[in-house]
Image (tube, coloured by chain):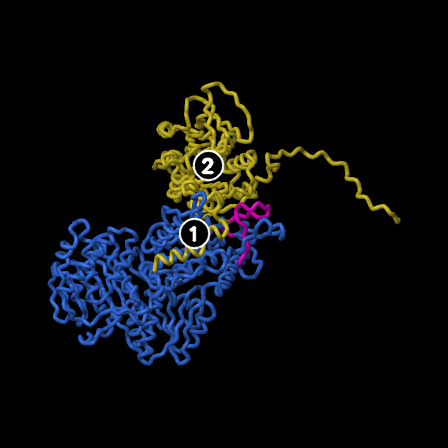
């Protein structure tokens, strides 16, 4: 497993073997990419969830289709924590390429289930080991050599099922979910699991304390990826044009939408579709189509990641300058450049907020959960049309591509908000129309759509200088007025983007600010700090521009920590630009390894800074660092 | 003076005989198709194209509000401001008109999209988008106002400049030109034509034929730049174009709303019935040519290239190719104003989706 270059927290103590540890541990499985391990891991994940136990899964995978090492972590947490933990108590070693380094990195006391048919040279005497001849077993379990590799991974599911006490009936239910109605696949895989269980029963003696026990904490919960959740949101948000260019980790968002629209956005009578989904030639074209469609009145969207955001820069500036709506889902990955395409970060925050040349700023919605991904997807379409602007929905790989537990999503109750669009009748009534006049004093002008037959309706949209009547101009006052109107529009958005979520604590001198997927580790870190006698208050940002609650929160707490998953403190930059009076107040906690954030990292870093301690090489803060 | 009878309005003064204004079939005057005053150089070929567009749309009787004018960046891309002032327009970013046009027609398939681009905007920075728009057959009249130079940046060669053509500064272009017509035919474009801005009659007929077509209609119009590319040694000057223009045929057009029988000698004219029922009549000049034969069009353009001939005419038409909205199986109504019940599935659908993830 790749080890963080960050300092490890105090090594987890090996539990005394006598005392059982129930529903509170992590399992990590090392396999090769493309070996079908994703199905096996999902079956394990679902089986535990179906036993009523809170669970989360994180896939750490390479930028590769087949062969390179992959690690999947399942966290079982009776208390409902779903952030990654740095240490996994149980390790399943199935990949010859990494078996030695994986075993070297294990913490004393860990449980090791390993494929004894692989070449292993590293010896340890401080682990609880279960050697299993998986290759041999898969030969016996599956006579068909073509399917054998996939079945091998189901055999380890069987061994884990036996050792942890997972109910086999739940595996069967999970398999049915996984393979839908493909009975042959269900039977083949179930047999392999049962084969693993039987073998373990006969050949292994339980030496470790970890096991699961049925709870009732997950009744009615769904297990879903953030990208799928956002796609369902777009479906319910009434998207009519979606253009995209494939890029990890955003592709599955649009692919989910395609599947959903095939089923649910077809006219029952004609069989024709009510949505246009186009795979464009590149991101320049995809954003151009989004804006052409938004200009003509469609609810239009694209999904992309950092490199795509860079390419969209010029067009997004045009949208800003000419008041054109559109929605961009940015599923953030590690940059710069190609970076680590299959690893997570919050590295596009500053870029998205200020994308393009000249003075530009754009609203962002920042979901932390799959439910927010669903909700904000819908909100983004409303907001884009209300404020006639590109709206960014900032997911990240961790949210987008991992499975998360959630309550089922609620059906939307609000009607679609189509913004300030003037119809022919409106123009008849008003007798006057100037495209860029700030009639309402909120910086948001009225617009007409192409095709409106009223003689007052047509106007000319341009990325060059324009006055309130949309006429070409280079007059200094016209330019300044336009820029001021756009700035005012941005001010209006402060109370239109999702408000932050605040958990106050009157006793707390410490305030923590986090956003996006950093939320889950932050929640856990706060509980740990509280247990250590350090109460904290918490503000979770959910939108940009910031509303007044953010400044109040910063002002109120003597010591203010800002948790981010990037090196340069991109959200800190935005907060400092907006509230320069607090620019030196932020104490940064920045995680940037490509791995998802864990609670221990936050606790360690916060406590070290509380003591005025030095953070060593874990973080680089530049010359003004704390 | 008191009076019990209501005051009568004074009789109107004897009306001066108003000049008989010509109206089109919609009863609209030509002014409804003009735009603001051009700011291009006096004598610019682009202004002749603008006039031909105005005339063709007027004659055809297109409702101005149904037109969306799209353009990129450059001298050519400014022209949508100079025609159809009662239509909406979108002057986008350099080389990206096709993407804007594609998005607009997907949102509202009832729009008549007119995309104006230049040779730099299309063949250099925008080549990718041009090719993909053609490949998708996005319904749009795509006009390339082709002068072989960058005008707004003062006379650099573009990718359509001919090999051996000299710039105003005396440099000779040593790279081969991009032939956008040949490229478009290769990519499956179902309407490909070339004209010269000095031939108003041919341009107008072509624009009308393009209006009758459904899908991408490419019109590559050689349009001399009087300021930077109209000198001796240039192959895109007025003189060169006039001297070397070889019309392939004489183009006649009978719109669907005029039920006129046209007599022609058998074998002298090729007739093509367009998507909307209009007819394009191509009268033979020097050679037999069938513009519905794609292979023949490829050969024709290759021969013109080797002979350095400025061939103008309609090179290829396929009135039956499905356009992009058909390929996508879109509903007949424009997507942009479908009612909420057609774009937001009902609650049982969400329940069903949620059940699938439990």
Front: mark 2 or 1: 2
Q: Residue at x 22, y 52 (%)?
A: A66
Of residues A22 and B324, the one nearer the viewer is A22
Q: Report how far apart the C-alphas of labels 2 and 1 lie in the structure.
A: 28 Å
Give the vertical position of B43 relative to A462 (above or below): above
Chain B, chosen colour in render: yellow
Q: Dot 1 falls on which chain?
A: A
Residue A222 coordinates in the image, percent (x, y): 35, 61
Give the vertical position of A195 relative to B227 (above or below): below
Q: Quadrant of the C terminus of chain A?
A: bottom left
Going by the image, does B36 lie left or right of A328? right
Under tag 2, what secondary structure? Answer: loop
Image chain in blue: A
Magenta stretch bounds? A444-465
Q: Is residue B224 visible?
A: yes
Residue that badge 1 annotates: A315
Residue A307 coordinates in the image, percent (x, y): 34, 54
Under tag 1, what secondary structure? Answer: helix
Q: Which mark is residue B338?
A: none
Residue that badge 2 annotates: B214
Going by the image, does B107 lie left or right of B61? left
Q: Dot 2 falls on which chain?
A: B
Give the vertical position of A202 relative to A436 (above or below): below
Of residues A357 and A407, the one nearer the viewer is A407
Q: How many marks?
A: 2
Give the vertical position of A53 relative to A257 (above or below): below
Q: Quadrant of residue A328?
A: bottom left
């Amino acid at each position: 497993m790749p080890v963080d270059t960050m300092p490890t927290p105090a090594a987890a103590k090996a539990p005394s073997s006598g005392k059982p540890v129930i529903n509170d541990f992590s399992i990590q499985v090392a396999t090769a990419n493309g070996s079908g391990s994703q199905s096996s891991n999902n079956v394990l994940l679902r089986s535990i969830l179906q036993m009523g136990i809170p669970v989360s899964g994180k896939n750490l995978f390479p930028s590769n289709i087949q062969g390179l090492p992959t690690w999947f972590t399942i966290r079982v947490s009776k208390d409902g924590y779903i952030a990654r933990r740095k240490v996994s108590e149980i390790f399943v070693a199935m990949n010859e390429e990494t078996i030695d380094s994986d075993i070297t990195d294990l913490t004393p006391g860990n449980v090791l289930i390993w494929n004894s048919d692989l070449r292993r040279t590293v010896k340890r005497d401080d682990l609880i080991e279960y050697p299993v001849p998986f290759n041999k077993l898969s030969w016996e379990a599956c006579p068909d050599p073509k399917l054998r590799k996939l079945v091998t991974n189901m055999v380890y599911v069987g061994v884990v099922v036996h050792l942890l006490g997972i109910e086999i009936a739940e595996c069967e239910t999970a398999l049915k979910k996984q393979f839908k109605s493909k009975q042959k696949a269900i039977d083949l895989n179930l047999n392999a699991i049962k084969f693993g269980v039987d073998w373990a029963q006969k050949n292994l003696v339980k030496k470790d304390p970890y096991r699961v026990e049925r709870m009732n904490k997950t009744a009615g919960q769904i297990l879903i990826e953030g990208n799928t959740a956002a796609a369902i949101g777009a479906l319910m948000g009434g998207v009519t044009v979606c253009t995209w260019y494939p890029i990890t980790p955003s592709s599955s968002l649009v692919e989910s939408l395609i599947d959903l629209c095939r089923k649910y956005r077809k006219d029952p009578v004609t069989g024709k579709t009510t949505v246009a989904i186009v795979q464009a030639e590149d991101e320049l074209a995809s954003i151009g189509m989004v804006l052409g469609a938004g200009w003509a009145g469609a609810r239009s969207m694209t999904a992309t990641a950092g490199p795509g955001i860079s390419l969209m820069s010029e067009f997004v500036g045009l949208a800003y300058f000419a008041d054109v709506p559109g929605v961009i889902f940015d599923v953030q990955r590690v940059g710069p450049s190609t970076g680590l395409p299959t690893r997570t970060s919050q590295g596009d925050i500053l870029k998205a907020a200020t994308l393009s040349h000249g003075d530009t700023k754009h609203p962002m919605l920042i979901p932390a959960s799959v439910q927010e991904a669903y909700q904000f997807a819908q909100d983004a379409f409303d907001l884009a049309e209300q404020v006639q602007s590109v709206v960014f929905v900032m997911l990240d790989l961790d949210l987008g591509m991992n499975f998360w537990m959630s309550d089922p999503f609620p059906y939307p109750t609000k009607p679609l908000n189509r913004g300030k669009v003037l119809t022919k009748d409106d123009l008849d009534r008003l007798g006057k129309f100037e495209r860029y006049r700030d009639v309402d004093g909120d910086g948001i002008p009225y617009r007409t759509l192409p095709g409106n037959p009223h003689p007052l309706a047509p106007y000319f949209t341009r990325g060059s200088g324009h006055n309130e009547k949309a006429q070409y101009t280079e007059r200094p006052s016209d330019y300044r007025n336009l820029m001021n109107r756009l700035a005012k529009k941005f001010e209006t958005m402060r109370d239109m983007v999702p408000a932050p979520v605040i958990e106050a604590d009157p006793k707390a001198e410490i305030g923590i600010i986090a956003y996006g997927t950093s939320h889950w580790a932050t929640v856990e870190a706060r509980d740990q700090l509280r247990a250590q006698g350090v109460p904290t208050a918490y503000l979770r940002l959910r939108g940009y521009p910031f509303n007044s609650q953010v400044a109040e929160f910063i002002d109120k707490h003597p010591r203010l920590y800002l948790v981010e998953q990037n090196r340069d403190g991109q959200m800190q930059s935005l907060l400092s630009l907006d509230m320069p009076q607090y620019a030196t107040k932020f104490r940064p906690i920045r995680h940037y390894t490509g791995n998802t954030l864990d609670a221990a990292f936050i606790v360690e870093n916060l406590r070290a800074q509380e003591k005025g301690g030095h953070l060593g090489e874990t973080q680089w803060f530049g010359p003004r660092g704390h | 003076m008191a009076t019990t009878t209501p005051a009568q309005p004074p009789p109107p003064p004897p009306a001066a005989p108003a000049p008989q204004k010509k109206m089109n079939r919609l009863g609209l005057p030509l002014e409804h198709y003009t735009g603001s005053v051009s700011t291009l150089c006096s004598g610019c070929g682009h202004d002749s194209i603008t006039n031909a567009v105005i005339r063709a749309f007027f004659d055809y009787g297109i409702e101005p509000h149904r037109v969306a004018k799209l353009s990129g960046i450059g001298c050519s891309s400014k022209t949508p401001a100079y025609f159809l002032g009662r239509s909406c327009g979108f002057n986008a970013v350099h080389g990206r008109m096709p993407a804007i046009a594609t998005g607009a027609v997907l949102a509202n398939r009832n729009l008549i999209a007119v995309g104006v681009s230049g040779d730099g905007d299309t063949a250099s920075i925008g080549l990718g988008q041009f090719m993909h728009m053609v490949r998708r057959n996005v319904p749009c009249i795509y006009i390339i106002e082709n002068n072989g130079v960058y005008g707004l940046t003062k006379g650099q060669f573009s990718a359509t400049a001919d090999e051996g053509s000299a710039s105003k500064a005396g440099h000779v272009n040593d790279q081969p030109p991009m032939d956008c017509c040949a490229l478009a035919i290769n990519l499956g474009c179902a309407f490909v034509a070339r004209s010269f801005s000095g031939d108003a009659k041919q341009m107008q007929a072509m624009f009308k034929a393009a209006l009758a077509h459904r899908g991408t209609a490419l019109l590559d119009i050689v349009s001399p730049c009087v300021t930077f590319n109209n000198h001796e040694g240039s192959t895109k000057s007025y003189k060169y174009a006039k001297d070397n223009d070889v019309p392939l045929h004489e183009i006649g057009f009978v719109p669907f709303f005029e039920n006129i029988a046209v007599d022609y000698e058998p074998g002298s004219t090729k007739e093509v019935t367009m998507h909307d029922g209009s007819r394009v009549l191509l009268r033979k000049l020097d050679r037999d040519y069938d513009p519905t034969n794609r292979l023949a069009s490829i050969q024709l353009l290759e021969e013109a290239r080797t002979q350095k001939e400025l061939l103008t005419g309609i090179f290829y038409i396929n009135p039956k190719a499905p356009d992009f909205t058909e390929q996508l199986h879109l509903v007949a109504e424009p997507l942009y104003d479908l009612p909420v019940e057609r774009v937001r599935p009902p609650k049982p659908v969400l329940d069903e989706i949620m059940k699938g993830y439990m």
